Amino acid sequence: MRQNDIQLHEYRILESDSNGHDFAQNRRSGSSQFVSSQFVSSQSVSSQSVSSQSVSSQSVSSHDLATAQPEELERRLGLWSGMAIVIGTIIGSGVFSTPSLILDAVGSAGMSVVVWILGAAVSICGCIAYMELGTMLPRSGGEKEYLDTAYPRPRALLSFLFCLSSIFVCSPSALAADSVVTGTFFVYAATGRASGHSEWVQRLIGVAVAVVCTLMHGFFVRGTIRVQSALTAVKVLLLLLIVFVGLVVALVHRDSAAATSQSFSHAFAGTSTHPSAYSSALFKVFFAYSGYTALNYSIDELKDPVRNLPRAALGGLFVTAVLYVLSNVAYFLVLDPEAIRSSSTAVAGVFFSKAFGEAVGQRVVPVFIGLATLGNVMCGMFSASRVIFEAAREGYLPLDRYLGSVSGFQSPLWALAMSCVLTALFIVTPPPGEAYSFLIDIGGYSLWLFYGLSVAGLLVLRHTRRDLVRPFRAWNVANGITIASALFMCIVPFMKPESEDGAIPYWAAPTSAVSFVALSGILWYVQIVLRRGIELSYNARNQEFK
C-alpha cells in the first residue's frame, strides 16, 4: 500500500476524487490488519510520480509501466445521483409485470398485498446489513469484498463463487427479464394488445435495449447518468399516477367499482397454504425490490461513501417500498383478480387501459412504462459491469487487462460488452412461454444464497475483526431476519408445489443455480490455484509499483 501522508484518529473520508480507493488494498498485499483510519492525501500524487521515475530507472518494460499507472473510475456520484441509481435499479419490470404471477402463486388479493409488505420489510433489513458492510469496507465489488474478508480460507473461494454467479447468472438473468418486459410494453403500445403477439419480437427488442444501454454507458458516461436520473423520475411519476388512480377509484367511484368488491370483499379467499407457493411469490417480490445494493458495487464512484451510501440506499429503498405497496393496492382497486391473472406480464398496461380508455391506456402509457423498464436495464447494466470490472482486476477472470481496463471515455468498456453479450444470451436461450418467470427464479436463488453468506459473514467479522471501524452498525434483528429469509429462499424451492402446470419443472431453477455454483468451484481451483490468478492480477501488478 502507498505510504500515506495523513493519519486520521477518527474514521472519516477525504472529500476528493481519491477518497476511499486505497481502503481495501492493504488486505490484498497480505497485511494482517486493515489500516482503516488511513487514506491517501493529495500529496500522494507527487510520491507516485517519484515512484514512476524510479521504476523507469530500473529498466522496467513499457507494458509494466502502463500497468503501474492506476486507472480509476471518477467519483462522479453524489447523494441525489446515487439515490437515483438505487431507485432506478429497484423500480424495473417487477412492479409493472409480476403482480399477476404473485397472485397466481398465493391465490388471493389480500395475501398478494401482504407478500409485498413482507418483501419490503425483509429488503429494508437486508439493506441495513449491507450498509454496515459497505461503510466498513468502502470499495467497489459488493459481496466480492465482503466474502473475501469474512471467509479468507480457502483463499478467495466464496468471493470467486459469488463473482461468477453474479456475472454469469444473477445479473444477466435479471437484465434479460427487464429487457424482455421492455420489449413487451413497446409491442403493447404498437399493437394495442397485452397478449397474443410474437414472443420473439419482444426478445429481439430486448436484445436491442441491452445493446443501446451498453453503448450509452460505454461512450456517454455523464450523459447516461443524467438520462438514468430522468428515467427514474418517469418511473416514480408512473407509480404515483397508479396510486392516484387507485385512490380516485376508492374514494370517488367506490359505488360503481365492481373490481373493488371482487378483490377486497373477500380479500383472503382462496389463499394458498403451501410453502412453495410463497417461495415462488417471494422470489418475484424480492426481484422487484432487488437493487438496493447497487451502490455497494460502485462505491469507488460515490463521493463521500461513508456518509452518502446509507442515505442514498435506505432513502431510495424506503420511497420505493411505499410506492410498491400502494401501487399493488391500486391494481386490485381498479382490476378484478381475473383481469390481473389474464394480463400476464402487462398488468400496468391493462390497468391504465381500464382507467383511461384504450387510446391512452394501450398506446401512450405503455411507451412510458417501457421507458421506465429501459431505465432499470440501464442502472442494472451499470452495476453488473462494475462487478466484472472488479473481478477481472482481482484476477478472477481471464483477460483481466481488458476486462479490468478503463477506456478513454472513463468507462469499463470491455466489462460492459461482456455484460451485454451475457444478457443477450439469457434473452434468446430460455424456452418460450415461461422464460420471464424462470429467469427471475434462477437469478433470485443465487442472489439469496450469497445475501445470506454475506450477512452471516458480517456477524463473523464482528468477532474476528474487531479492529475494523464500523461507521454504521446494523441491528442484530435485521441481520437475523435477512439470514432466516435467505435460508427459506434456498430450501423451499426444492419442495414440490401443490400443482405443477408449466413445461419447466419446479426444481429446474434452483438446481441450475446450485449446479453452476458447484462448477464454479472447479473453475476456482483452475484460475486461482493452478493459474495463480490473484498473484498475476492487475491489482497485484499495480501493488508492486506503489
Image (tube, rainbow, N blue to C red):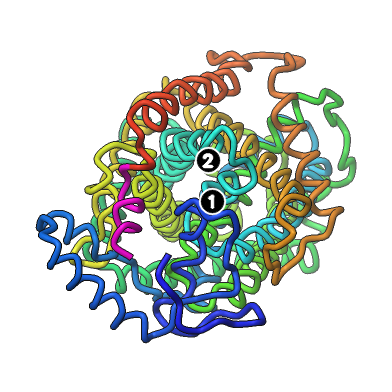
The residue furthest front is 58
Residue 68 placement (x, y as % from top left): 24, 61
Name the quadrant containing residue 239.
Answer: bottom right
Say which element carries label 1.
helix
Q: Nearer the viewer, residue 293 or 101?
A: 293
Residue 438 placement (x, y as % from top left): 53, 27
Numbered label attached to residue 159: 2
Taking the image as shown, residue 211 lies to the left or right of residue 142, namely left
Residue 214 placement (x, y as % from top left): 28, 53
Asked if residue 359 can be seen in this view, the reply is no
Residue at 18 percent across and 55 percent down: it is 64
- For marks 1 and 2, the one nearer the N-term is 1
Which quadrant is the N terminus positioned in?
bottom left
Residue hosting label 1: 145
Numbered label attached to residue 502: none
Q: Nearer the viewer, residue 214 or 410?
A: 410
Question: Label 1 amino acid?
Answer: Glu
Taking the image as shown, residue 147 lies to the left or right of residue 337, namely left
Segment tinted magenta in the rendering: 536-546
Do residues under tags 1 and 2 come within 8 Å of each other at their CB atoms?
Answer: yes
Near mark 1 (Cα within 10 A), the count class, few <14, some 14-19 or many ≥20, is many
Residue 428 placement (x, y as % from top left): 33, 29
